[in-house]
Image (tube, rainbow, N blue to C red):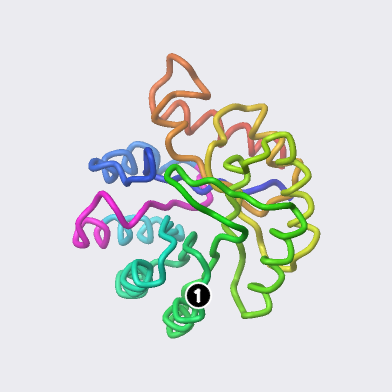
């Protein structure tokens, strides 16, 4: 199975203010999932964008980059309130799982030791895997793995493969997939899905192309490998 694309309307960990316009540019393409952050749009605009994505039969991720429990509670409630399909990111807390389990939303938190902004994933591979297995046992639906934010870049491939093999729930490779080489590496690692946001705005896949042409290039690349 080829990994799925989660198209994020985000740049530098913030939802772009004209996200709805970008959605309109690509909504006819064969994108698997869409997503954005809790930062950058007011709640009414978030609700409007979520509704528009649902109107074409697609599911929506809310990705939250927060580490403190108190700062995660409101975005988790917001995900439920606005009808998102997935809450991705956040450090795992039982209180957040309880909020999400009151709805039909799937919860895919981070695993491992995470700090700073932009985020850094730290720790030995064995520690990250054990942390994921501990969290999986609590009843989460998957993991948002900051693979290419790992402190030891030479071990990214080993990390992702180890995690995919060690848990039963889906793994999403989140962030910094900015070339076809890295995209193919991600597919080879066997993740269920991956996010791309900023790389589309920065035209990393078609240097002189439009936003749509960059998204289209990745979609075509994936479909050719199915």
Please name whichever residue, 146 or 126, is drawn nearer the observer in this view of the structure. Answer: 126
Looking at the image, which residue sits at the far top?
A: 208
Q: What span is in magenta?
A: 30-48
Is 123 on the left or on the right of 219, as rendered? right
**What residue is shown at x 61% (from left), y 48% (from top)?**
173
- Rendering quarter of residue 82: bottom left
Residue 124 is situated, as x and y percent measured from the top left of the image, at 73, 52
Seen in the picture, residue 17 relative to 183 is either above or below; the reply is: below
Residue 183 is situated, as x and y percent measured from the top left of the image, at 64, 34
**What residue is shown at x 74% (from left), y 40% (from top)?**
155
- Rendering quarter of residue 10: top left
Please name whichever residue, 107 or 23, is drawn nearer the observer in this view of the structure. Answer: 107
Which type of secondary structure does the marked residue at label 1 adopt?
loop
Residue 150 is situated, as x and y percent measured from the top left of the image, at 62, 43
Please name whichever residue, 47 or 134, is drawn nearer the observer in this view of the structure. Answer: 134
**Quadrant, the C terminus:** top right
**What residue is shown at x 77% (from left), y 58% (from top)?**
126
Q: Can residue 166 be found in the magenta stretch?
A: no
Residue 166 is situated, as x and y percent measured from the top left of the image, at 79, 63
Q: What residue is shown with label 1?
A: 93
Seen in the picture, residue 97 relative to 88 is either above or below; the reply is: below
Is 220 on the left or on the right of 134, as rendered? left
Q: Can residue 47 be found in the magenta stretch?
A: yes
**What residue is shown at x 62% (from left), y 79% (from top)?**
139
Rate crowding at label 1 as few (under 14), some (14 to 19) or many (20 or more) other CA atoms within 10 Å. some
């Amino acid at each position: 199975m080829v990994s799925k694309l989660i198209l994020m309307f985000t740049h530098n960990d913030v939802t772009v203010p004209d996200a709805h316009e970008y959605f309109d540019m690509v909504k006819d393409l064969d994108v698997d999932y869409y997503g954005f952050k809790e930062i950058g749009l007011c709640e009414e605009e978030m609700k409007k964008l979520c509704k528009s994505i649902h109107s074409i039969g697609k599911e929506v991720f809310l990705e939250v980059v927060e580490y403190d429990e108190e700062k995660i509670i409101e975005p988790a409630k917001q995900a439920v309130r606005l009808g998102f399909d997935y809450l991705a990111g956040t450090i795992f807390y039982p209180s957040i799982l309880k909020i999400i389990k009151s709805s039909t939303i799937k919860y895919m938190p981070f695993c491992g030791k995470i700090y700073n902004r932009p985020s850094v994933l730290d720790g030995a591979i064995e520690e990250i895997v054990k942390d994921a297995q501990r969290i999986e046992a609590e009843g989460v639906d998957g993991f948002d793995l900051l693979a290419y934010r790992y402190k030891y870049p030479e071990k990214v491939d080993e990390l992702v493969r180890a995690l995919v093999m060690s848990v039963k729930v889906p793994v999403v490779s989140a962030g910094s997939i900015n070339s076809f080489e890295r995209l193919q590496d991600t597919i080879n690692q066997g993740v269920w899905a991956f996010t791309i946001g900023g790389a589309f705005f920065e035209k990393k896949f078609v240097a002189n192309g439009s936003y749509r042409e960059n998204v289209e290039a990745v979609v075509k690349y994936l479909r050719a490998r199915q």
